[in-house]
């Protein structure tokens, strides 16, 4: 594990670590044996794909099923697993295997990577993360395997099941079918298995551990209560809205049965939470639907999960803060607990930095690519939220456009605040304070 230089902060080491994984993946994907095309993949396409896999995004500039050999697909699958679980989780697993002890510096890195409050119990949490991941992916793969046996040979069904179980649980969205899951729009087994994997992967490992140990949401921490509450609200609101908006759209749900429409709406409400799979054509969705998908992609999954976005808890803190201002409360309270000011400032910082990044990249791409605003905005938020949904413009992006989306995916996976902290010089608070003065806002 890379902890030799003690001058680096945990944030800086994480950024460097993920960059090292992406560069390694890029080199491997450029090897001629990794692709079906002669001469191998060009560096921009390889970098884009490696970043998309490591950042568990799922945006592609070449078709994963046809452009890559089994070797190339396995490289992508390994990058997805590393990126989804977190660099330090995978490094700790290697340390477990070789019998190496985890140092304090490495525990600080794990704390930063898994977004945890305390340094105590981190090694035990990593063990739990690894066990839970392989168990859930194994169950998902088994369900997918049994269903895919109807259409494919034993070994192809086995391979496809493992690949898509890993891709779904890690909220990556890479597929080997060539058109995501559009060929399984009404397939209840495929849909529910992938939904099950996406939701569990997006809740966060600490939340899963607490739910398993306590099995009563009333006894869980504030973190778990907010994650479960916001996740359920977003899924329900998304489901009802998508069903209503796309019900008569002949290009998406219009020609489906009511049961298939219900299943499609449910899938569409879950997948923007950074998963990237789609069962109906994303490019054919109404503008109103696309905008709602953008909102869900921006919010994303939960802290310490395999997903991206500003996170459900950040969104929850913002909602609670606004509600407290409206109702005239001085304290920010929820579930009979008071939030610290530091948490509120952090939530605001993450949201503002994320909005600044999305706005900047969208403006640059609308100029450089000469495309309509909504598809570019959608693509940018999808990259930031490490979602992977696209209206179909990804492969049409210029080399510069692909680099901008690559940077956005990386910033979304590492986290805009972590990235800012990695480059910013931390200053200690002074022993003195300036006089307070009010300004008018709003």
Image: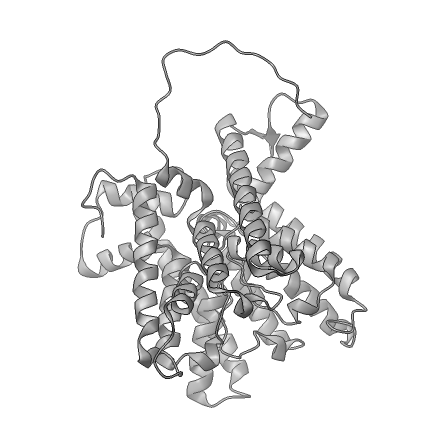
Residue lying at 36% horizontally and 39% vertically, measured from the top left: 423
Residue lying at 47% horizontally and 79% vertically, measured from the top left: 65
Residue 153 in picture, x, y percent from top left = 47, 90
Residue 179 in picture, x, y percent from top left = 57, 77
* 98 lies left or right of 274: left
Along the line of sight, the residue nearer the viewer: 37 or 193: 37
User: Looking at the rendering, which quadrant does residue 421 occupy?
Assistant: top left
User: Looking at the rendering, which quadrant does residue 5 occupy?
Assistant: top left
Query: Where 118 sits versus 293, above or below?
Result: above
Q: What is the quadrant of the C terminus in the image? A: top right
Query: Where 439 sits versus 141, above or below?
Result: above
Residue 274 in sight in this render: yes
Report the residue that reaches farthest toward the bottom. Answer: 153
* 400 lies left or right of 266: left
Residue lying at 67% horizontally and 26% vertically, measured from the top left: 325
Report the residue that reaches farthest toward the right. Answer: 248
* 147 lies left or right of 19: right
Along the line of sight, the residue nearer the viewer: 240 or 361: 361
Along the line of sight, the residue nearer the viewer: 34 or 164: 34
Q: How many marks?
A: 0
Q: How is the image coloured?
A: one colour
User: Looking at the rendering, which quadrant does residue 21 occupy?
Assistant: bottom left
Residue 162 in picture, x, y percent from top left = 43, 75
* 251 lies left or right of 208: right
Residue 207 in picture, x, y percent from top left = 48, 48
Query: Where 277 sits versus 291, above or below?
Result: below
Residue 216 in sight in this render: no
Along the line of sight, the residue nearer the viewer: 314 or 289: 289
Residue lying at 32% horizontally and 43% vertically, measured from the top left: 12
């Amino acid at each position: 594990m890379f902890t030799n230089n003690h001058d680096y902060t945990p944030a800086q080491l994480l950024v460097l670590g993920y960059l090292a994984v992406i560069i390694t993946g890029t080199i491997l994907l450029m090897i001629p044996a990794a692709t079906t095309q002669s001469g191998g993949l060009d560096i921009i396409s390889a970098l884009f794909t490696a970043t998309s896999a490591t950042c568990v995004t799922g945006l592609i500039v070449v078709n994963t099923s046809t452009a890559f050999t089994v070797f190339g697909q396995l490289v992508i699958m390994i990058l997805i697993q590393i990126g989804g679980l977190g660099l330090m989780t995978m490094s700790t697993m290697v340390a477990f295997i070789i019998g190496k002890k985890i140092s304090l510096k490495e525990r600080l890195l794990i704390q930063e990577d898994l977004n945890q409050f305390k340094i105590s119990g981190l090694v035990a949490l990593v063990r739990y993360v690894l066990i839970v991941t392989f168990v859930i992916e194994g169950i998902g793969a088994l369900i997918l395997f049994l269903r895919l046996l109807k259409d494919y040979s034993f070994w192809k069904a086995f391979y496809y099941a493992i690949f898509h179980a890993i891709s779904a649980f890690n909220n990556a969205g890479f597929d080997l079918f060539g058109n995501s899951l559009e060929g399984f729009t009404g397939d209840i087994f495929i849909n529910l298995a992938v939904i099950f994997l996406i939701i569990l992967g997006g809740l966060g490992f600490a939340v899963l551990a607490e739910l398993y140990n306590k099995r009563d949401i009333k006894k869980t921490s504030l973190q778990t209560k907010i994650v479960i509450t916001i996740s359920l609200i977003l899924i329900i609101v998304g489901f009802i809205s998508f069903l209503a908006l796309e019900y008569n759209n002949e290009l998406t749900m219009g020609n489906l049965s009511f049961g298939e429409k219900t299943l499609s709406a449910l899938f569409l409400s879950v997948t923007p939470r950074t998963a990237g799979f789609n069962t109906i054509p994303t490019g054919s969705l109404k503008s109103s639907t696309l905008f709602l998908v953008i909102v869900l992609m921006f919010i994303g999954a939960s802290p310490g999960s395999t997903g991206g976005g500003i996170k459900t808890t950040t969104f929850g803190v913002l909602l609670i803060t606004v509600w407290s201002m409206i109702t005239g409360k001085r304290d920010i309270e929820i579930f009979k607990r008071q939030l610290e000011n530091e948490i509120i400032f952090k939530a605001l910082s993450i949201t503002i930095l994320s909005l600044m990044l999305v706005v900047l990249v969208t403006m640059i791409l609308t100029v450089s690519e000469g495309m309509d605003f909504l598809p570019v905005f959608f693509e940018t938020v999808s990259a930031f939220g490490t979602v992977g949904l696209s209206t179909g413009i990804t492969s049409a992006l210029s080399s510069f456009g692909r680099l901008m989306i690559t940077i956005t995916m990386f910033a979304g996976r590492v986290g805009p605040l972590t990235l800012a902290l990695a480059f910013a010089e931390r200053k200690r608070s002074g022993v003195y304070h300036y006089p307070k003065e009010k300004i008018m806002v709003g």
